[in-house]
Image: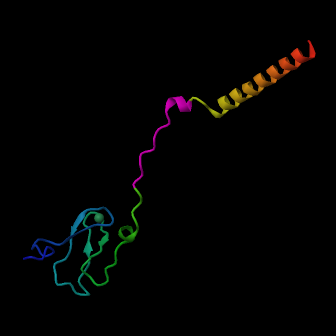
Amino acid sequence: MNDPYRFGGPVTAVCPGCNAVVVLPAEPLFEDTPPAICSTCETEVPDYRRPSFTMPDTLGAPTAEPTLPVEEPRPENQRVTRGGLFRSLTGLVADRGLSAIEQARERSGF
Ligand SMILES: [Zn+2]
């Protein structure tokens, strides 16, 4: 009784269709032993004890990186919209233009 896979209880697998726990047929398994059918959604449940068993793609595929929660932009950063930024840049250019005009006026004696 040291084999953890032979605990005497029913052998179960998770249904790939609805994730319900399905009891697999008792061993020994033969080629013509009918596969376990999920009683909930009637999907054929793959039996890992069969030689033909292949790992489902979902288990073999690399798991997606856990996504870190995206830091919400803080309100002070959201206040500057593209239009607002353009307006402030326009104002800056206009201010510089005006001061340049004023300097030119001072130099020319107006
Ligand atoms: Zn199912």
**Splitting the image into 4 quarters, where does residue 10 fall?**
bottom left
Task: Work out which quarter of the rendered image holds the N terminus and state it.
Answer: bottom left
The single residue placed furthest to the front in the displayed view is: 107
Residue sitting at x 25%, y 62%: 20
In-front residue for pair 92/47: 92
Residue sitting at x 16%, y 81%: 27
Say if 65 sits above or below 15 in the image. Answer: above
**Splitting the image into 4 quarters, where does residue 60 fall?**
bottom left
In-front residue for pair 108/94: 108
Say left or right for 40 vs 109: left
Q: What percent of the width, then of the height, locates residue 59?
A: 35, 68
Image quarter where ligand 1 lies:
bottom left
Q: What percent of the width, then of the height, locates residue 44?
A: 30, 73
Q: Which residues are magenta?
A: 66-78
The single residue placed furthest to the bottom in the displayed view is: 31
Q: What percent of the width, then of the height, locates residue 95?
A: 76, 22
Q: What percent of the width, then of the height, locates residue 40?
A: 26, 63
**Splitting the image into 4 quarters, where does residue 84 fall?**
top right
Task: Work out which quarter of the rendered image holds the C terminus and state it.
Answer: top right
Residue sitting at x 36%, y 72%: 56
Say if 21 sits above or below 1 in the image. Answer: above
Instruction: State the count of labels.
Output: 0
**Any magenta on residue 53?**
no
**Any magenta on residue 71?**
yes
Say left or right for 36 vs 105: left
In-front residue for pair 4/56: 4
- Tell me the chief SS of the magenta region: loop
Say left or right for 44 vs 67: left
